[in-house]
Amino acid sequence: MKQNKHTNFFLVIIIISMAISPAIALGEGNRNLLLIGVMVISPFIILRHFKFDNMDLLLLLFLVTLIIFPLTNHPESMRWSTVMYSAMFGLTFIAYKQLLSQKYFTIINYIKLLKYLIYAYFAVLLIQQLCVLTGIPILNVSNYDLNYPWKLNSLAAEPSHSARIVALLMYSYIISKEKLLNRSYNPKKDVTNDKWVWIAFIWTIFTMGSSTAFLFISIVLLKFIRFRNLIPLLIGFGISILIINTTGIAEFERAAKTISATLTLDEPTIIEADHSASIRIVPILILVKIVTIKTLDGWFGHGTDYVSTFLSDYLPGVPDGISGGGLFQLWIEYGFISFFLFLFFSFKTIFKKGEFLNIVFWFFLVFLYGVNSQIVWLCIIFLYTNIYFLKNENTRKTKLF
């Protein structure tokens, strides 16, 4: 019983620290000091259980390349703080897997935790909105712009992060409920039973003031597309679009313009459509033209933080030293071998036949990010956990709460 409590405690702590970024815990560069504190204990958990599978060894090999390649190819660029940060994320994931494999943490524990996290994002956002409405200091605010008073971060570092995280939480909740119920999630029946979760999710997504939210709620709703309900969904979606257009919601218009501009693959057009969104999109288009396997640097990298030495030259209105480019940044700085190892590890970890949306979330939350990102590892942890319960949980031994 004691072992059970300890295992579940550390599992819950890892999940919560990955899922939130309290303003009080944000350090330089929006690094989550709470999460860093939790990740420090990961090596001790690993030493306690000391059980590895092939994917763990692949991840460890990847982490070793992050040390060896810069030291041998561009030693002047080596930044131990950056490498150790990556190692902490990787070791935390291994520790999490080892704890989950003890089988003390059940699917019901997981569903409850997901539900409470969605409620927490909703509650904090609602309090923030009341603070804005009444003019009192805003609770837990970070990255706030007075020009957009209703654009609020809730429990993440910024509103766009909240949009991504809450959508991932809701998707994981739906997947887990399907396993527990032993059938597909029924929008007519199950949304009624989960009405408070859906109310919290919809309110958070639609009122946080982030255009990113419209993309991610669309991804979540793709889960319900079946041939028999395709027409009603399209009609409902069309009506929703019409209402949103009529009311002139700026965030939706920004999202639509950004998507339209991105499809052109023209960098100036994307920057003009939405400068803020272009900072994440345009670097990928820039780096994909640079990556190569024809040179030594193409295989082993140009060195740590190399992208930050030139990226600002291509992006107007950004500070010197800005970085980005998703996993192509990993290729540029550490080489194709490191890039391929992480690409294979992350995709293999989240892939399950028939779960197409896993790939969609992986693309938007892993491939389009860098390795040293809380959202990347949050996505990997949740998608891995979803698959773990789909494969291992015996729902006949559990009861619906």
Image (cartoon, rainbow, N blue to C red):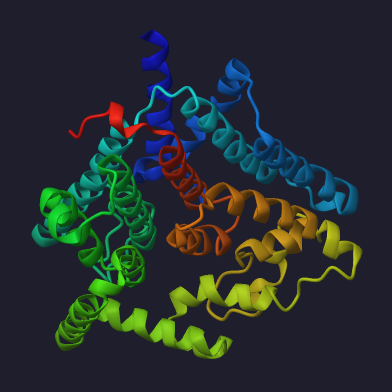
Q: Residue at x 55, y 37 (%)?
A: 93
Percent x, y of residue 142 = 34, 54
Examine the rendered structure and indicate whether residue 364 appears above or below residue 66.
Answer: below
Q: Residue at x 33, y 36 (%)?
A: 110
Examine the rendered structure and indicate whether residue 233 appears above or below residue 356.
Answer: below
Q: Is residue 313 left or right of residue 126?
A: right
Residue 112, quarter of picture: top left
Percent x, y of residue 312 = 63, 74
Quadrant position of the C terminus in the picture: top left
Quadrant position of the N terminus in the picture: top left
Residue 7, quarter of picture: top left
Observer-nearest of 144 and 115: 115
Percent x, y of residue 394 = 36, 31
Examine the rendered structure and indicate whether residue 238 appears above or below residue 394.
Answer: below
Percent x, y of residue 152 = 27, 60
Q: Residue at x 77, y 55 (%)?
A: 334
